[in-house]
Amino acid sequence: MKTESKKKISEEIFEQMKHMIVSGQWKPGDKLPSEKELTEIFHASRISVREPIKQLVSLGMLETRHGAGTFVRGFNEDQFTIPIASMIYGQKLTKNDILQILDLRQIEIIITGLAAEKCDKEGIQELWRIYHQMEEGQNDPHVHLSSDYAFHLQISKMTQNPYLVKICRLLYETLEEALKTIVVIMGPQKALYYHNKLIDTISRHYVIEAKATMEEHLKTTIDAVKAIPETSNIFADYSK
């Protein structure tokens, strides 16, 4: 019971420390308070404070300098991409895994609406360029996957919101292995159909129609996944 209690305290301290780094309360280059001071700040034992520091060092958010102390290195999205991606890479994806991953893509409906509202001529031209690239390489799964990623990333760029671009990039790069399975399930023709329709509605600044198209695109993908038996070989093992 005591061990479980200490573990819970360490986890709470880890979350608090992580928040202080992410929020900027502890800035890159700042030296952490001494171990004794940290025990007073968090009202915890030295052991309960040491473990969170070790975890944050392993994540690259803190660094320990011999003879100088522990310092803040900062935060970027890669520090969360790596552990999330490691949950997927090398695993046999189940139907439920794919469906839960598709739930994360619902944010693209909002992104698409903003793109339709704010798009310009250059952004639409880039969408068409990527579309034709996908069309030409539709028989090559690797080309299809990279073009699909580029297409959706370009839509996020057209929102003119750098934070949404980061979210979209993080989403696709983290879920790359799962998206390989989704591309196989959908096939190139359906993707090309919806991408063509997305370009049409976005270029006309039809916000409602563009969002509806993206929603339909995602729903079609979800329905296709649901229709496949759990035992199907299509839920591939990406351990290589």
Image (cartoon, rainbow, N blue to C red):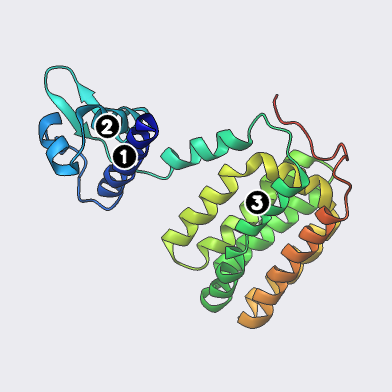
Q: Is residue 236 left or right of residue 91?
A: right
User: For mark 2, does the 10 Å Cα neighbourhood hold few (<14), some (14 to 19), or many (20 or more) residues?
Assistant: many
Q: Amino acid at mark 1?
A: Ile
Residue at 67%, 57% (x, y): give it: 129
Front-most of residues 22 and 77: 22
Q: The N terminus lies in which quarter of the figure?
A: top left
Image coordinates of residue 135 in percent, x first then y, are: 79, 53
Task: Say whether residue 186 is left or right of residue 57.
Answer: right
Marks 1 and 2 close (CB-CB < 8 Å): yes
Q: Is residue 77 above or below residue 67?
A: below
Query: Residue at label 2?
Result: 48
Hey, what amino acid is under mark 3?
Ile
> How far across and down, in percent of the image, does residue 220 sit?
80, 63
Q: Residue furthest front?
A: 1
- The residue carrying pointer 1 sits among few (fewer than 14), some (14 to 19) or many (20 or more) residues within 10 Å by Cα, namely some
Tell me the number on the disc at residue 101: 3
> Label 2's element?
helix
Q: CA distance from mark 1 to mark 2?
A: 7 Å
CA gap between label 2 and label 3 equals 34 Å
SS at mark 1? helix
Which residue is under mark 1? 9
Left/right placement of residue 13 relative to residue 25 reads right
- The C terminus is located in which quarter? top right
